[in-house]
Amino acid sequence: MLISLLRSHLRPLRRLLVAVVVLQSIQTAAVLTLPTLNADIIDNGIATGDLAYIWRTGAIMLMVTVVQVMFAVGAVWFGARAAMGFGRNVRRDLFERVTGYATQEVERFGAPSLITRITNDVQQVQMLVLMSCTLLVAGPIMLVGGVIMAVREDGGLALLLLVSVPALVVSVGLVVVRMVPQFQAMQERIDQVNRVLREQITGLRVVRAFVREPEETERFEQANAQLTARALAAGRLMAFIFPAVLLVLNVSSVAAIWIGGGRVDAGELQVGSLVAFLTYLIQILMAVMMATFVAIMAPRASVCAERIVDVLHTPPTIVTADNPIRSLPERCGVEFDRVSFAYPGAEAPVLHEVSLTVPPGTTTAIIGSTGSGKTTLLQLVPRLYDATGGAVRVGGVDVRELEPEALWARLGLVPQKPFLFSGTVASNLRHAHPTATDAELWDALEIAQASEFVAAMPGGLDASISQGGTNVSGGQRQRLAIARAVVRRPSVYLFDDSFSALDLTTDARLRAALAPITADAAVIVVAQRVSTIIAAEQILVLEDGHAVGLGTHGQLLEVCPTYLEIVESQTEAVV
């Protein structure tokens, strides 16, 4: 998975990668030249007392060093650009994939896991790319070039490389292999910590209301302890790598000096050549150590790459038709034709062959007990889910045959849990209509019975709204969400229990203000309160996913026992 991800997302950056390879090759060649020049100074300058030779060769070494530094800086610069570009492209593709997901895919992965994959996982692979460009590319060049130069200095001493290099590779490889499952488990623990933390921050009011701070603290500490344990296990394995590298490096150096010293004493090797060989030996082992840095990161990056590719290779279940219809009439009705729906993995369907027609200019209410399928039925219209049986039509066209943008442009959805984005009142309302004027925004707020409290907020339309709308009350949040839908002036209004947080007086005023605005639109209202839907042209009663009644309020009181039971229960509650 890691190789596949790198290949697909580094291909557009191949020019930068070619520049990195060229620059690293030149700077590595310069590094490999320095020990030979140093040996010449020792053997031909210091040993003979030729000061002019020392100065000339020293000046050449200085120029080579300048070249090496310049090209090393260039290689790092291009490598950093390649790594950052890779991370940018992966995050962009992940974002586009996730924003195209239906509710089903989001629930499968979980929001905390998706956030971790887009941020932390991408960062881990991006860091691997950066380290590869700055260290790994130079490593093989240094290794091959160092071996060649070492053999040139003394072939007998070069036999040490046949022992030291494999010993280093094997010792590091054994540790890296054991690190892969540890890093895999660690990423899962990070997801768990994010999940617990997200729940606790989002549900902070509930935690405090039920005095659950000690229990939630213990739950977080447990998740945090599991992550810490995995991180420590991986850290302990990682701690073996550097001692192993240094042990092999130092033992090899001692062996080279011991054997080389004897050869120098026997007149078979010059002192400069021995010094150069030692330098090449260190460079060769350092090249392996540089690869070790990358090897340390590779297991975790591999796990992260698998999680990233899992998202990129999971197609959305809600797909656009091959030749979608891109236009709808101005006045659109909604039709449910023997619609059934079952959640993935569920034992039984949530909806069973529900049929309903909502003509333009009418209001249809959906009511039923909790879990009867009201919200699920409404979510089939904007294709948050696709019906598993039957068809949902808008403007006479099956929603699966419509281009999603064309469908969504005709809908005004107020979800059961209204969500406001961080920003201002105006920016939230303009999510539905980006070019809406201030006058249009105030008009929508007036209809939603929200203009009074917005005008009282500091800044009015420019008043700050925190993420999720947590700095306004539940009723205010609902009214702002309704105003956002009204700003669009859609052909179909979908209200999913959108009046539950309003008092009866505000509810009545809001519905009265909506009436002229929605006169030509198809309106579907999911509600729990009978008073909210009593004036609807038709009311659909759901029970356990089955349509058990359809008609006006008066008709249902006479022919639908389920509806009568709902009305009586609310009447008794009022009494």
Image: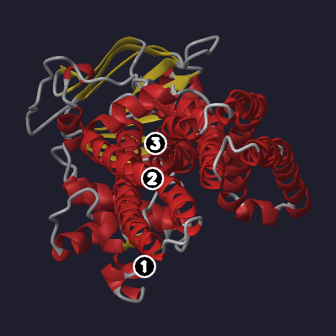
* SS class, disc 1: strand
* SS class, disc 2: helix
Residue carrying label 2: 33
- Per the model, the C-alpha gap separating discs 3 and 2 is 18 Å
Q: Earlier in the sequence, mark 1 or mark 2?
A: 2
For the C terminus, the image quarter is: bottom right
Residue 407 found in image quarter:
top left
Residue carrying label 3: 137
Task: Tell me what residue is drawn at x 69 percent, y 27 percent.
Answer: 162
Task: Tell me what residue is drawn at x 54 percent, y 42 percent.
Answer: 117
Nearer to me, 468 or 364: 468
Nearer to me, 95 or 305: 305
* Residue type for callout 1: Ser
- Per the model, the C-alpha gap separating discs 1 and 2 is 63 Å
* Residue type for callout 2: Thr
Task: Tell me what residue is drawn at x 16 percent, y 22 percent.
Answer: 396
Residue 236 found in image quarter:
top right
